[in-house]
Amino acid sequence: MIMVNLMRLLSDVGINNAAVQRKELNDEALNTAFTLKLLIGTVIYLILYGLSGFAIHFFDDPNVVTVIRLLALTIIINTFAFIPCTRLSRELRLKEIVIAETANTLASSLIAVAMAVNGFKFWSIVAGFIVSNTVFAVIVNCYCPGRFVFAMNREIAKDLLKYGSSVLLAGLVSFAVYNVDNLVVGSVGGSSQLGYYGLAFNWGSMVCGIMSAVVLSVLFPTFSRMQEDKGKMKQAYLDVLQYTAIFSVLWNLTLFCVADRFLIHVLGKGTDKWLPALDSLRIFCIYGVVRSLIEPTNTLLMASGNARLVLKSGALVALIELLFIYPAIRFGSITVVSIVVLLAFVSQLFLLRKYIVHSYGVTFKDIAKIMVPVVGVAVAVGGLYFLGNGVVVNSLSGLLIVVTAVCSLYLVVYGWFTHWQHYSRIFKLLLR
C-alpha cells in the first residue's frame, strides 16, 4: 500500500496542479504540459524499474520487484487522463469527474475482491489498482475527447516545472510525513503495535480523507479561478473553513466519545482485542480536526502559487516527527507517538495561519468566530457525555443510542447557538 500511494503521487509529478492553477491555458500550454508529464513519467518509470531490484533487500520477498514494476505502469497510464481531466477541472465539470472516480473505485473494488476471494492474495490489490487507473483514463477521455499532441514551448515548460516541482516536493514531504510514523512504529514496536496505531490513525483521520476526496478536489480549481481577487478568496476560504469545522468536529467528537464502545462492539465484535488502541484513537480524533483545518489552508496556498510554503510547513512536521517519534515508541508507547504527531500538525497549523493573516487579512477574530462556537459546543456535549457515561448500557444497541444522542445534541446546541444561520446556508447550497 505504501508503493500504491507512492505511485499515485509520482503519477502527478506536479504538472496536474500547475496546469489547473495556470491563469491562461491554451492548447499550446496544455500540449506542452502533456508532453512534459509523459517525458517525466517515463523517466520515473524507468528509474523505478531499474531500482526495483534492490527492494528485495528490504522486503525479503522476490515478488515485490514485480509488484513495483507493475504498479509503476500506472504513471504512464495516468498521463493519458491528464488533458481531459485538466479541462474538466478548470471548467468545474465536477459531475463528470465524480462519475469517473466512482467507476474507478467500483472497478478497483470488484477486481480486487473477486481476485482475493479466489486466492490471488496481494496480487488482487495490484490488479485492482491498475484496472482502476485504466478505467478512469478511459472515462474522462469519453467525457472530454481530444487529441494527444506532442509540443514543447520552453517558456511555458519552465513556468510549469517551476510550480510543479514545488508541488511534487511538497507531495513527497507529505508522503514521508504520513509514512515515517508507520515505519518507525512497525520497526521498533512490532506488527501488533503498528496494527493498533494504524487502526487509530485511520479512523481518527477518516474525515480528512473524505474532505480531501469530496471538498478539496473542488476547492483547488475554484480557488485557482479567483486567485486575482484576494477578498473573494478570503471569504470563500472562511466559508469552507466554517463548513469543514462543523462536520469534522461532529464526526470526531462522536468518535471520541464512543471510542471504547466502538472498538469493542464494532471492530472487536464484542471483545476487547482492539482496546489498546483506545488512547491513540482519541488523540487522533483531535488530530483529525486539526488536519481538517490545515487541508483547506494548504489548498488555498497551492491555488495562489505558494506551494513552497506548503513544502516548508510539511518539512516542519517531518522534522518534528523524525526527531521525536523514535524515542516516543522506544521509551514510551503508541499513545506518546500519537501525541507527537498531533503536536507536529498543530505547529504546522500555526505556521500556516501566520501566512494567511499576512497575505489575505484573515484575522484571529475571523478564525475565532468560526472555531469558538464549534469547540465550545463540542466541549459541552463531550462533558455531558462523560458525566452520564454509565447511564446507557454498554452494548451495540447502546452504542447506537449514544451516537444518535451525541450527534443530535451537538447539532441542536450548535444550531441554537448560531441562530441556525449556518444550517440555512448549507440547506440553500444543497438545493442549488
Image (cartoon, rainbow, N blue to C red):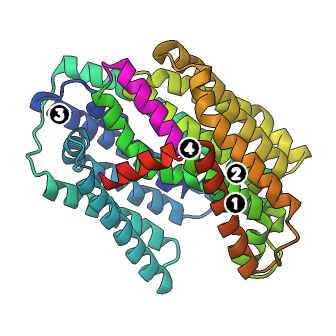
Residue designated by label 4: 419
Residue designated by label 2: 285
Q: Tag 2: residue type? A: Cys
Q: Nearer the viewer, mark 3 or mark 2?
A: 2
* Distance Cα–Cα, label 1 vs label 2: 7 Å
Specify start and end residues of the magenta stretch as a single range: 227-245
* Distance Cα–Cα, label 3 vs label 2: 41 Å
| Crowd around label 2: few <14 · some 14–19 · many ≥20 (10 Å) | many
Q: Residue at image x 52%, y 39%? A: 242
Label 3 close to label 1 by CB (< 8 Å):
no
Q: Earlier in the sequence, mark 3 or mark 4?
A: 3
Q: Earlier in the sequence, mark 4 or mark 1?
A: 1
Query: Could you tell me residue 413's position as x and y percent?
Result: 65, 51
Question: On the image, which quarter does residue 10 sit in?
Answer: top left
Q: Residue at image x 59%, y 64%? A: 61
Query: Could you tell me residue 403's position as x and y percent?
Result: 68, 67
Query: Could you tell me residue 244's position as x and y percent?
Result: 52, 44
Quarter the N terminus occupies: bottom right
Q: Earlier in the sequence, mark 2 or mark 4?
A: 2
Q: Earlier in the sequence, mark 1 or mark 2?
A: 1
Say if residue 20 shows up in the picture.
Answer: yes
Q: Nearer the viewer, mark 2 or mark 4?
A: 4
